[in-house]
Image (cartoon, coloured by chain):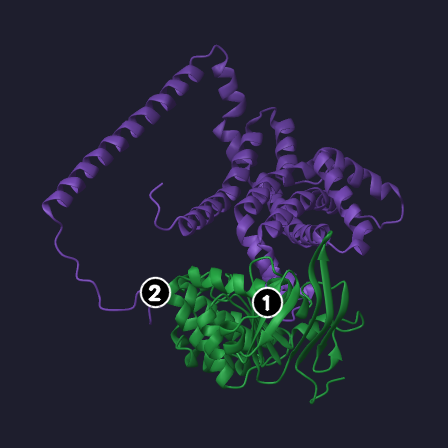
Amino acid sequence: MTDTTAPVLELRGLRKSFGDQEVLRGIDLAVHRHEVICVIGASGSGKSTLLKTVNLLEGIDDGQVLLQGEDISDPRVDVDATRARIGVVFQQFNLFPHMSVLDNVTLASRKVHRASRPEAEANARRLLDRIGLGDFAAAFPDRLSGGQQQRVAIVRAIASDPELLLLDEVTSALDPQLVGEVLDLVTELKQQGSTILMTTHEMHFARNVADRIVFLHRGEVVEQGAPAAVLDDPQHPALRAFLARVHAA
Amino acid sequence: MTSPAGAGTPLVTPAPSQVERERQLYRRQRGRRSVTVSVVSTLVVVVLAWIGIVNTPGWAAVQQSFFDPQVAWETLPDILLGLWLNVRILFAASIGVAVLGTLLAVVRGLRNPVFFPLRMLATGYTDLFRGLPLIIVLYLVGFGLPGLGVFPRLAPEFWGTIAIVLTYSSYVAEVLRAGMEAVHPSQRLAARSLGLSHAQTLRLVVLPQAIRKVTPALMNDFVSMQKDVGLVSILGAVDAVRSAQIAQAEQTNFTPYLVAGLLFVLISLPLIRVTDAIARKQQQREQIGGAV
């Protein structure tokens, strides 16, 4: 059952394989209320898989995922109801192209949380206004720039007040000049107290906004801590090599 | 009205330059020439074909037995009455096909292993009914099912409608399934991540996008069904084709068939135009900014 003193999210010995390739090798990680955690690591280190297992979009082979102290990796758990408590934003936005921006944002509120349409729309319009996209409520996603689409996707994910927000490389598909507007919105969410677990390649952003940085290497957490400690004083050779490559780029 | 894209100062279009005016003139001349060539060549082909047919040895006899305006006018009311039955069958069959076709497509798209038997059943169904000629399905359903002796006496048009629904559902199911597979998996992922159930994801996210993708193909099936509705005549239903057959026997003249045929073309024309327009619109949307 929901335990308010427990971490929002806790991973215990999480394991996941694709065929004979072990992608996650016993991950232990806790995300506390109002914390922003950035997971970094080379491609193929298991970052995206980690986020997918948290939201039960990917099954796990062993270990536990606890949301507010409740084991959501238990097969008896209502998967849809659990997913509704977690917001996800994808690298490729994945807005629904056949729905207006407003319908995209209100879909979960209306269909999953059973809010009335006026109620859901009022909430959505308030959120869209806040990110400066109020005029686009009736527009369809293909009329928006990548940065605008991603900000709508973030609003869609937070529209029904999730307990945890998962952001999977939300700026990787964007032109460099659009990255800023999306990261500014994430920063704003942190200031409002959202609990966020995100993967990112934006080291500068991770340094300034993350409470903790977790370095994933070959499916294991090999180093974690405050941004300054992890980024400026790396201990593990793999992290040193990774940071050297990132800074060289 | 706010314009989402490109809001800003309105553009003042300057007068076209000398170069642009020259290009426009050239394009207009080319356009006129193309239209002239196509009109003339079409006319030549049509006239040649007409002369060819009219000068065949049997033309006089054919003209009398297929193109008799007197017979056409006299038999028109009966055939129109029959056509009304075709239209009603078409309406009922469309609803049946939409329901059964969607159901089959959804079942065939189920991935969970526990649905394996259902999926096999749906696959077997579409394989069977896409392979069976409609005429044979009509005979089996129209004469076989009533023969079982468990159904009350029902009109032949009822059984004809059932046969058409059975056959066309299998085509429509395949088209819809192709459309559903063309919806990117990330759309399902996004829907499920919001907490939508499998059924909600299908209904609200996958199917609307799938239907949009395959609208031209669905319309094509619909037009095809519209004319196949005429086959219910073989069960004895007095539709346009059957009325034409009766009139043909009475008048010993084939003109009624031509009348029925033209009427079928007439009712399908609006839909064919709509199909073309939808396909064109879709193409335009997908090719924004491209010249070819």
Is residue A138 shown to the viewer in this render?
A: yes
Tell me residue B185's x, y (percent): 60, 56
Q: In this view, does A130 lie above or below B73?
A: below
| Relative height, residue B269 to residue A141 (above, below) | above
Chain A, colour shown: green
Neighbourhood count class around disc 1 (C-alpha, 10 Å): few under 14, some 14–19, many 20 upward: some
- State the residue lying farthest toward the right: B149
Please report the residue visible at 58 percent of the width from the left and 60 percent of the height from the top.
Answer: B187
Q: Where does residue A28 sit, x and y in percent of width and height?
A: 70, 73
Where is mark 1, residue-wise? A236
Badge 2, how many Cα within 10 Å: few under 14, some, many 20+? few
Q: What element carries label 2?
A: loop
> Which residue reaches farthest left?
B18
Residue A103: tell me if it is visible.
Answer: no
Q: Which residue is drawn at 79% across and 72% down?
A: A74
Question: Relative to B193, is A152 on the left or the right?
Answer: left
Chain in purple, by letter, is: B
Q: Quadrant of the C terminus of chain B?
A: top left
- Residues A86 and B12: in front is A86
Q: B216 and B229: which one is in front?
A: B216
Q: In this view, does B130 lie to the left or right of A127?
A: right
Q: Mark 2 lies on which chain?
A: B
Which quarter of the rendering shows the N terminus of chain B?
bottom left
The residue that disc 2 covers is: B5
Rendered position, A104 above or below B31: below
Please tell me in which quadrant of the rendered image residue A137 appears.
Answer: bottom left
Query: Farthest residue in the top direction?
Result: B57
Measured Cα–Cα span from mark 1 to mark 2:
48 Å
Image coordinates of residue A101 in percent, x first then y, are 47, 69
Q: Where is residue A150 in the image (x, y as percent from the top left)?
A: 47, 68
